[in-house]
Image (cartoon, grey):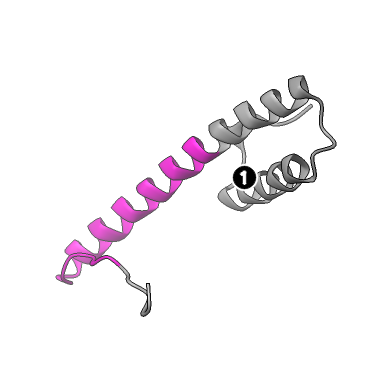
């Protein structure tokens, strides 16, 4: 039985999401299974987003405690 998304680490969630995407892209999944996998994927994404936001808040608090400037968005050149 699959773990609940909230009980998975960020890395476990990412790995499962990659598998879901690969399965759905391959196309050998019934419609019912595809919908179940899509729903699971949405839950994993939402939970992972929450974990990332929580980590960002912790970093911001730690940086503020050290007197470091606020975080700035990261932009990749050429995008």
Q: Quadrant of residue 71?
A: bottom left
Provide the residue span drawn in magenta.
Answer: 45-73
- 28 left or right of 58 in image: right
Q: Relative to 72, is 38 above or below?
A: above
Figure label count: 1
Question: Viewer-proximal residue, 52 or 24?
Answer: 24
Q: Residue at x 75, y 23 (%)?
A: 31
Task: Answer few, some or many: residues within 10 Å of disc 1's Cα (few below 14, many 20 plus, some between 14 and 19).
Answer: many
Q: Who's the residue at 85% across and 36% down the image?
A: 28
Residue ranking furthest to the right: 28
- Label 1 SS: helix
Q: Position of residue 7 (x, y in %)?
A: 60, 35
Q: Quadrant of the C terminus?
A: bottom left
Can you tell which quarter of the image residue 51 is in? Answer: top left
- Mark 1, residue position: 13
Magenta segment's dominant SS is helix
Q: Residue furthest bottom?
A: 77
Would you place residue 65 above or below residue 46 in this image?
Answer: below
The image quarter in which residue 1 lies: top right
Residue 19 image offset from top left, x and y in percent = 74, 46
- Nearest the eye: 56 or 63: 56
Q: Residue at x 18, y 63 (%)?
A: 64
Residue 73, placed above or below residue 47 = below
Residue 7 vs residue 31, the one in the foreground: 31
**Residue 27 position within the rendered picture, expressed as x and y whole percent measured from the top left:** 79, 39
Does the magenta run of residues contain 38?
no
Q: Residue at x 18, y 72 (%)?
A: 68
- Left or right: where does residue 23 sit relative to residue 54? right
């Amino acid at each position: 039985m699959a773990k609940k998304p909230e009980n998975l680490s960020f890395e476990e969630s990412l790995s499962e999401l990659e598998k879901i995407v690969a399965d759905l892209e391959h196309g050998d999944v019934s419609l019912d299974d595809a919908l179940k996998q899509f729903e699971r994927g949405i839950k994993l994404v939402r939970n992972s987003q929450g974990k990332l936001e929580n980590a960002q808040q912790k970093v911001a608090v730690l940086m503020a405690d050290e007197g470091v400037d606020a975080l700035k968005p990261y932009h990749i050149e050429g995008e």
